[in-house]
Image: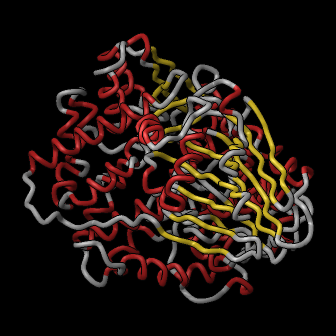
């Protein structure tokens, strides 16, 4: 797990170390163990390393293979790298390291663009082919690893974070009004390839990008999720057993692909608890490290789920680490968490993950996390509500997911950012794509391939990597996702959702953990907007920077400030927090950026 960056120039200039260094400095926290760069004429590649597999200098990046004429920078983990290495050795390739980076390099030489179809894991990487004078970029199927791109007629630059591109300069930082519509409608989700900034795009998951010396780019989608029933009927028991086998294989492959200890972020919910239960079958208790975080209670809600995580710890006798964080520290550290965001994220648990990762990173470099299970196996409360609704696909989806309708969006933002109902158009288009059998199949496919990429998945990556901590997400292993997409929705919805996982968990976890009401990562101080947190938001939205930006309409801001707890989204998010978070991110990330074009 690392941070990568690079530049390919199409003019007569050579790539220079100064540009790379600016980006690498921004990426330092993603890779605290090592740094390296490669310069060859128009191309420059930079890397910050978090050493997880092959801790020796042989795995240093950028990795150069002079015999093949290839150089690579890579962020992520390839879980099947040992099998691929053996396959490539049988084809005559000689390896000089023990890690997964060199496996990708050889795989690219063997299979070219098709190499990605052989990779099981989370990844973004760039391969420079000096013989073809060609740059090849790739992103994993589910978008677990991020890659941002800034392209002009003179160059293309890429980096693991958006702030790294801003540090290199010359970025058009004007707000993309289509992306703004998505951001304020889909609780901060801006689907790829857009970002909030006109000058920055991000790679679409499951795609590759080939760039030539003339600046021509060719994008190719190598993976799409199909949500169709198999031709041969499958019984309920067979679905459960297939899920058990596939999830177990994913959990074990994520555990084994490391030369350092691998822990588990144990929230106390079904998903992370199930990971512990499966790992406990193959891991001695003294080697099973678990980590939980809790916050101060609010009158309306408890700030921790320790009562559940403690039961799992007691059952398996894990080496447990439990942290309680006072509300004062949440507010004090909030600006840090916002600064760590590549894009603004309104999820209340962003700061929770940031503070938890800080503690966990002092003990381990790698953890498994339960992200993705709710979307893959239909665990959220709104899925059955959508299922029961009537009307078009969009009409069934929109009331339970959109933070505000188009009319309210027009009231929210300045007239300069008005336009069409871009989010409804996009969602309608994505729901209508071929390859999904029922309405709920369409919704779950949209969630898994598009929405969670830029919500919980991105949040976990940003907040953990801010402390040099690698988070692995077995529930988003593409083999499990492909299997789950074939399972009939009514089977997944049984017992308030995630029935296949609950069936597996019966022999592994206490019933109180399995049958508890669906929980979330509680940060009550952010959910109930009052006291010092309200003052923080008031200060941000009344700041001179906010007023000069003229992004929001003042009447709407004042309306929310007058009664903040009255204005909540259908998913129980604070609309005031959404605005304050966006403005705070713009002030810290964009206004503070250097050499940007505005």
Q: Where is residue 386 drawn, in percent x and y?
A: 29, 69
Left or right of residue 441: residue 297: right
* Residue 364 visible in image: yes
Q: In this view, which residue lies farthest toward the bottom? A: 420
Q: Where is residue 393 drawn, in percent x and y?
A: 32, 79
Left or right of residue 454: residue 554: right
Quadrant (top left/top right/bottom left/bottom right) for the C terminus: bottom right
Tell me which corner region of the image, top left, top right, bottom left or bottom right, holds residue 174. Answer: bottom right
Query: At 32% across and 78% down in the image, what residue appears?
Result: 434
Left or right of residue 161: residue 26: right
- Answer above or below: position of 383 versus 434: above
Looking at the picture, tell me which residue is in the foreground, 336 or 534.
336
Looking at the picture, tell me which residue is in the foreground, 69 or 122.
69
Tell me which corner region of the image, top left, top right, bottom left or bottom right, holds residue 576. Answer: bottom right
Quadrant (top left/top right/bottom left/bottom right) for the N terminus: top right
- Answer above or below: position of 483 versus 520: below
- Answer above or below: position of 273 versus 389: above
Q: Where is residue 418 drawn, in percent x and y?
A: 66, 86
Left or right of residue 140: residue 214: right
* Residue 79 visible in image: no
Query: At 23% across and 67% down in the image, what residue appears?
Result: 228
Query: At 63% across and 71% down in the image, what residue appears?
Result: 194
Looking at the picture, tell me which residue is in the foreground, 527 or 507.
507
């Amino acid at each position: 797990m690392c941070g990568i960056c690079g530049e390919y120039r199409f003019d007569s200039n050579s790539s220079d170390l100064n540009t790379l260094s600016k980006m690498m400095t921004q990426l330092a926290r993603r890779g605290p163990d090592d740094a390296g760069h490669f310069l060859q004429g128009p191309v420059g590649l930079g890397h910050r390393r978090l050493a997880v597999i092959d801790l020796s200098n042989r795995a240093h990046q950028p990795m150069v293979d002079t015999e093949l004429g290839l150089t690579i920078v890579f962020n992520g983990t390839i879980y099947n790298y040992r099998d691929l290495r053996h396959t490539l050795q049988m084809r005559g390739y000689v390896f000089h390291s023990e890690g997964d980076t060199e496996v990708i390099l050889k795989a690219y030489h063997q299979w070219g663009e098709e190499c990605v179809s052989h990779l099981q894991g989370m990844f973004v990487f760039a391969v420079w082919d000096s013989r073809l004078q060609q740059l090849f970029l790739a992103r994993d199927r589910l978008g677990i690893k991020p890659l941002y791109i800034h392209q002009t007629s003179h160059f293309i630059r890429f980096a693991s974070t958006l702030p790294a591109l801003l540090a290199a300069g010359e970025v058009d930082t004007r707000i993309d009004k289509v992306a703004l519509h998505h951001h304020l409608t889909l609780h901060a989700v801006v689907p790829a390839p857009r970002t909030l900034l006109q000058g920055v795009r991000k790679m679409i998951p499951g795609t590759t990008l080939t760039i030539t010396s003339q600046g021509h780019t060719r994008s190719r989608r190598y993976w799409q999720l199909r949500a169709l029933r198999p031709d041969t009927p499958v019984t309920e028991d067979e679905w459960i057993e297939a899920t058990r086998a596939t999830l177990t294989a994913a959990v074990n492959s994520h555990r084994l692909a490391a030369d350092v200890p691998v822990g588990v972020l144990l929230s106390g919910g079904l998903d992370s608890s199930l990971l512990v239960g499966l790992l406990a079958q193959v891991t001695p208790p003294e080697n099973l490290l678990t980590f939980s975080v809790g916050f101060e209670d609010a009158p309306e809600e408890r700030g921790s789920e320790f009562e559940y995580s403690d039961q799992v710890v007691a059952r398996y006798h894990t080496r447990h680490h439990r942290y309680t964080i006072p509300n004062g520290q949440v507010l004090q550290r909030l600006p840090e968490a916002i600064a760590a965001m590549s894009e603004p994220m309104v999820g209340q648990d962003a700061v929770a993950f940031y503070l938890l990762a800080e503690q966990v990173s002092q003990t381990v470099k790698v953890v498994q996390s339960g992200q993705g299970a709710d979307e893959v196996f239909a665990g959220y409360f709104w899925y059955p509500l959508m299922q029961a609704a009537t009307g078009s696909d969009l009409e069934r989806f929109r009331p339970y997911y959109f933070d505000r309708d188009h009319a309210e969006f027009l009231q929210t933002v300045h007239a300069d950012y008005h336009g069409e109902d871009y989010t409804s158009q996009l969602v309608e288009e994505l729901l209508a794509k071929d390859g999904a059998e029922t309405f709920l199949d369409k919704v779950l496919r949209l969630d898994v391939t598009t929405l969670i990429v830029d919500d919980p998945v991105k949040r976990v990556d940003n907040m953990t990597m801010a402390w040099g901590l690698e988070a692995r997400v077995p529930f988003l292993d593409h083999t499990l996702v492909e299997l789950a997409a074939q399972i009939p929705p009514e089977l997944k919805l049984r017992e308030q959702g995630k029935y296949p996982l609950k069936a597996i968990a019966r022999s592994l976890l206490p019933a109180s953990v399995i049958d508890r009401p669906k929980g979330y990562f509680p940060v009550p101080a952010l959910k109930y907007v009052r006291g010092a947190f309200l003052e923080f938001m008031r200060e941000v939205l009344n700041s001179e920077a906010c007023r000069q930006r003229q992004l929001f309409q003042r009447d709407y801001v004042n309306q929310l400030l007058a009664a903040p707890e009255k204005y909540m989204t259908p998913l129980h998010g604070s609309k005031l927090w959404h605005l304050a978070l966006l403005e705070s991110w713009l002030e810290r990330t964009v206004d503070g950026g250097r050499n940007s074009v505005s």
